[in-house]
Amino acid sequence: QVQPVESGGGSAPAGGSLRLSCTASKYPDSDSCLGWFRQAPAKEREWVAAIHMGRRQLYYADSVKGRFTTSRDNAETTVYVAYLQMNDLRPEDTAMYYCATMSQSLWENCGSTGYSTWGQGTQVTVSS
């Protein structure tokens, strides 16, 4: 599986918005989950959101619910693009953001564990 590639990070003031993109290859024989994670300096990695790429079901951590939205494109190709729209940003959202993928059946949910292929991350910095 090809490593996903994140883009769109940068700096924003508190209350501002950023949108991250993740380009990932499809699993040839199954559906998949795409997860978003973040890691701030000296903190453990935190799961942020996920999307089931087949059912388009969305999952969010409580810390971002109502502020962050994940989605995917509609292209029917071997590569898909997922997005993480981040609104009402807070200084505590400052972190390196990663996307990751895992093979998943159509009938199973996506969660915060089990991801096998990770991107290299993109930095998000929110100033107060």
Image (cartoon, helix red, strand yellow):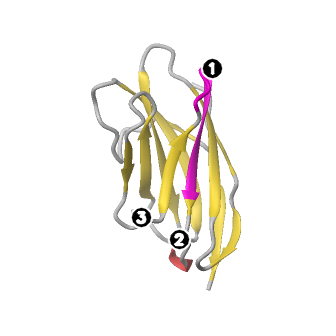
Question: How much space separates mark 2 and mark 3, taking CA atoms?
Answer: 14 Å
Q: In this figure, which residue is indicated by the disc labeled 3?
A: 66
Residue 10 x %, y %: 71, 64
Q: In this figure, which residue is indicated by the disc labeled 2?
A: 93
Q: Are marks 2 and 3 in contact (CB under 8 Å)?
A: no
Q: Residue at 28% across / 26% down in the picture?
A: 107
Pointer 1 or 3: first along the chain: 3
Residue 118 shown left or right of residue 66 in the figure:
right
The secondary element bearing badge 3 is classed as: loop
Question: How much space separates mark 1 and mark 3, taking CA atoms?
Answer: 30 Å
The residue range painted magenta reads 74-85
Q: In this figure, which residue is indicated by the disc labeled 1?
A: 77
Q: Nearer the viewer, mark 1 or mark 3?
A: 3
Residue 110 x %, y %: 34, 39
- Where 97 sits versus 115, above or below? below
> The residue under label 1 is which amino acid type?
Thr
Q: Nearer the viewer, mark 2 or mark 3?
A: 3
Total count of labels: 3
Dividing the picture into quarters, in which one does residue 17 lie?
Answer: bottom right
Residue 39 x %, y %: 51, 62
Q: Are marks 2 and 1 in contact (CB under 8 Å)?
A: no
